[in-house]
Amino acid sequence: MARIIDLCEPRAKPAGAWGPLNAAAQRGLAFTQAVKEETDHLYELVEHVVPPVEWPAYAPLIAAINKMKRPKNAVILAHNYMTSEIFFCVGDFRGDSLALAREAARTRAKVIVQAGVHFMAETSKILCPDKTVLIPDMRAGCSLAASITGADVRLIKQRYPGLPVVTYVNTSAEVKAESDITCTSSNAVQVVEWAAQEWGVDRVIMLPDEYLAKNVAAMTDIGIIAWAGRCEVHERFSAADIAEMRAAHPGVVVLAHPECPPEVLAAADYAGSTAALANYVGKHEPKKVVLLTECSMSDNVAQSSPRTDFVRPCNLCPHMKRITLAGIYDALKDMQHEVLVPEDIRLRAKKAIDAMLALPRTAAPLDFAVGLPPADVTVLDAAALG
Ligand code: 13P
Ligand code: SF4
């Protein structure tokens, strides 16, 4: 079984990050023999991270959620950053944000519960206006999505007329509505190159993640005008962290998400979207690995990588961690926290997402090159726009 070498002090985890352990009891759900029998096979998927003593707190919620799905015609889309008891035990579809968007567009279920953050739920609603899209906690936001508004994008377009706007999916529907095409970390280079070619230009506007834009710029000749948005989780990683980890864990393979600063990608062994990182571990089975991304990813990838040990850094996304089993249970039971998008915004945002989904599908998420010198990128912020 994979070993998790946790660099996180238990006390450093935010209180309630995994939901209160008495949440099932508060909802009148008990760990009965029937619940045990229904869920024993699921425990096997999470036993490497959920201690046996905690399982009786989770299992009643898991059993109750799974029972509600069929009568409500609901599916749960679970992002790679969900904690393992959500990801493996109630998630119907699991993956990175591109895979979840594709699944939302495809599913025949009437109700989608987004086990992820708000922009992901909005993307599902934009693609499926006839479905009810629920998010277990409306406060599950994203620092990148919060960094820019539709009005900012309109000002940028005024300043750089004629350039295509490529927008990361980690944005609000309003921002997507001002964009020409969206991208994710699975396809960012492909989208930037496509947009430049389609518009017949040698520069594109790419919003709002400064580091993703710089990491893309290092891989292409297309010039990039970026925005000073950052992911509050990935911006904390540094090249010095990598040097420390390599010293403490000789031979460790370092994988980084492209929301990390360019100096991190320069020092890493491989970089890619959350799906690309998981695929890398599955394919190469390194003896010891560190994933420089949200820390629940390591727990989830470890499940199918018994021959790999994971050094797990302590970078929790506080927004992703708002999604708990109890929240999913409440959302589905009471059909609460519905995500809605005004129709005029939805239609314009959908055009940008559809443009991305229409691009030729690559067999696997595209890699980011590591070790490249930094590229020159123009970075705008609200002050620069006046
Ligand atoms: P992915 O598209 O790689 O799943 O990333 C989404 C995200 O929010 C990473 O922080
Ligand atoms: Fe947003 Fe960063 Fe959290 Fe991903 S990890 S949802 S980019 S804040």
Image: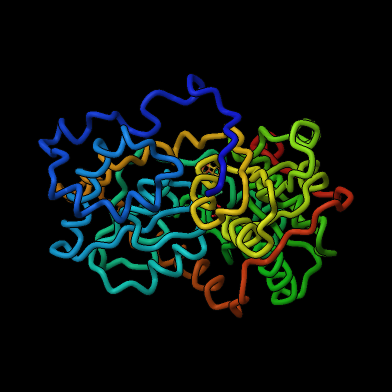
Give the residue at x 74% y 36%: 249
Residue 26: x and y in percent read 15, 30
Total marks placed: 0
Q: Is residue 222 left or right of residue 209?
A: right
Instruction: Name the residue furthest right.
Output: 373
Q: Is residue 230 left or right of residue 90?
A: right
Residue 286: x and y in percent read 69, 54
- Asked where in the image residue 343 lies, by quadrant, the reply is bottom left
Give the residue at x 71% y 45%: 211
Q: Is residue 278 left or right of residue 321?
A: right
Instruction: Name the residue furthest top.
Output: 11
Residue 325: x and y in percent read 29, 42
Picture quarter with the C terminus: top right
In this view of the protein, can residue 232 be seen by the observer?
no
- Asked where in the image residue 284 lies, by quadrant, the reply is bottom right
Along the line of sight, the residue nearer the viewer: 180 or 2:
2
Along the line of sight, the residue nearer the viewer: 75 or 385:
75
Residue 95: x and y in percent read 48, 60
Instruction: Name the residue furthest left.
Output: 28
Q: Is residue 292 left or right of residue 83?
A: right
In this view of the protein, can residue 26 be seen by the observer?
yes
| For residue 203, above or below residue 145 | below
Along the line of sight, the residue nearer the viewer: 206 or 5:
5
Along the line of sight, the residue nearer the viewer: 179 or 303:
303
| For residue 312, above or below residue 347 | above
Give the residue at x 39% y 63%: 93
- Asked where in the image residue 197 lies, by quadrant, the reply is bottom right
Colour scheme in use? rainbow
